[in-house]
Image: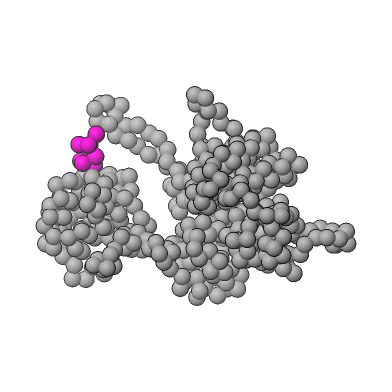
Amino acid sequence: MILVVGGSADVEQLKLLLSSASRTSTATNLLFALTDRTALAALSDDAPLVSTGEEQRAGGPRSVSWTLEEEAGGASAIASLRYKLIGLLLGWGFGVLNAAPPTVFLSSPWSYLYRDADIEAMSSGWDDGSAYGYNHVLDDPSMGFTRFCHGSRIVAYEPGFFFAMPTNEAIALTARMGLSMAQLPAAATVKAVREAEREAFLHELWLPSHHEYASVGAILRVMNYLCFVNSKVMFRQLRSATFATAPIAVQINYHSTDAPARMSAVMERYLDLKPSTLQQLPLAEAQAGGGANAMATTDEPTLSCDRSGASSGSSLGPMLAASLVERSPYAWGGMGDLIFSQDGTLKTPWGTGSWGLHSPSALWADFVGAKHNVRMLPSGLGISTRCGDNNVVLVRSIKVAKQQH
């Protein structure tokens, strides 16, 4: 069963979600609308309210609506209610696919779930390392031959899209999440509740029992990030990949102000085979920008990826260049050691590249066939944007970090 909880602010998103479910024959949708008005506005002929036994005998409901008289209690109360509903359905023996309103279905998801874990959750990650985790090594030279400490890093899971099996552990997870959401301030904003929910969801599925904290013990499976797709993967990678297969579902979770437009564009691309609208939308929301260029002011033009006529090394800005050389080695997205040389050579763990300056506060760094633009902050921290796909990573001086600690 697919559970969707939405309020009056979600009407346009709910319409698109239910339309996509109808067009892809995604059956058994339960819409829990927080007001009668929301239900009537969101539901159409493609997703009828079930009110007669005749409709049920004709093949069962595709969409059912429950309503409340009013939206009370704010975003935190709504989030808590959602987990109570999931727990209730799990207790009745239903497997529940929880989908937030800004979701579109491009195929019926039921054939693509493994059902071998308590929770199958969408990832916020954008590649294998971020989605499924990777071995992150910390180096402490003072410890001699035991200097290397291995750990794991992984990007968060999406509480707005997960499938829960009717198990005791999954029910315990929903109870814990419902309690966490209920303890948030009643006046908490939607953004604050979403951030708190994502953090709590990650903690409950990732943290081991320790001290007074006891894990609910739910076993997790992370969904394939190229099948169950977050909007960062969609707009940064898939929309330009002509060879890519169609996703199963897409959730607009990295964008908030223009979700209906992005949902509609995704449906046009994959259900109507019209890619033009999807290609025209910006990578990030207009007011936020993205990556290194998001830091640009009116006095700082957008950084170019064209290297024709670019000078390497320190010829354009001696202060920044001298700082880069002096503060080497650098960590690039947590990976070291990158060494900036005075002659424009850049030594990296992946091979030798080159670097140069755009301006007194920005540089370019090219290696292993990829171009990067980096804006440096006064603190010495850099924000790099890869030209090919707008991947953003932090650039830090390892030497400075060791001096500070």
Q: How many marks?
A: 0
Q: Nearer the viewer, residue 162 or 309?
A: 162
Say if 310 sits above or below 98 in the image: below
Type of secondary structure dominating the magenta stretch: helix
Q: In screen coordinates, is 62 left or right of 224?
A: right
Q: Nearer the viewer, residue 318 or 354?
A: 318
| Visible residue check, residue 315 | yes
Residue at image location 16% in from the left, 65% down from the top: 311
Give percent across and percent down for residue 27.
72, 58
| Visible residue check, residue 266 | no
Give percent across and percent down for residue 261.
53, 69
236 in magenta: no
Give percent across and percent down for residue 379.
23, 48
Give percent across and percent down for residue 13.
60, 63
Q: In screen coordinates, is 294 left or right of 397?
A: right
Residue at image location 20% in from the left, 41% down from the top: 399
Q: In screen coordinates, is 94 left or right of 375?
A: right
Q: Which residues are magenta?
A: 398-405
Q: Identify the image quadrant of residue 146.
A: top left
Q: Nearer the viewer, residue 150 or 194?
A: 194
Give the quarter of the figure containing the C terminus.
Answer: top left
Q: Nearer the viewer, residue 354 or 33?
A: 33
Say if 374 sits above or below 333 in the image: below
Residue at image location 62% in from the left, 44% down from the top: 80
Report the coloring of the rendering: one colour
Q: Residue furthest top?
A: 211
Residue at image location 71% in from the left, 53% down from the top: 68
Q: In screen coordinates, is 339 left or right of 210?
A: left
Q: Identify the image quadrant of residue 93.
A: top right
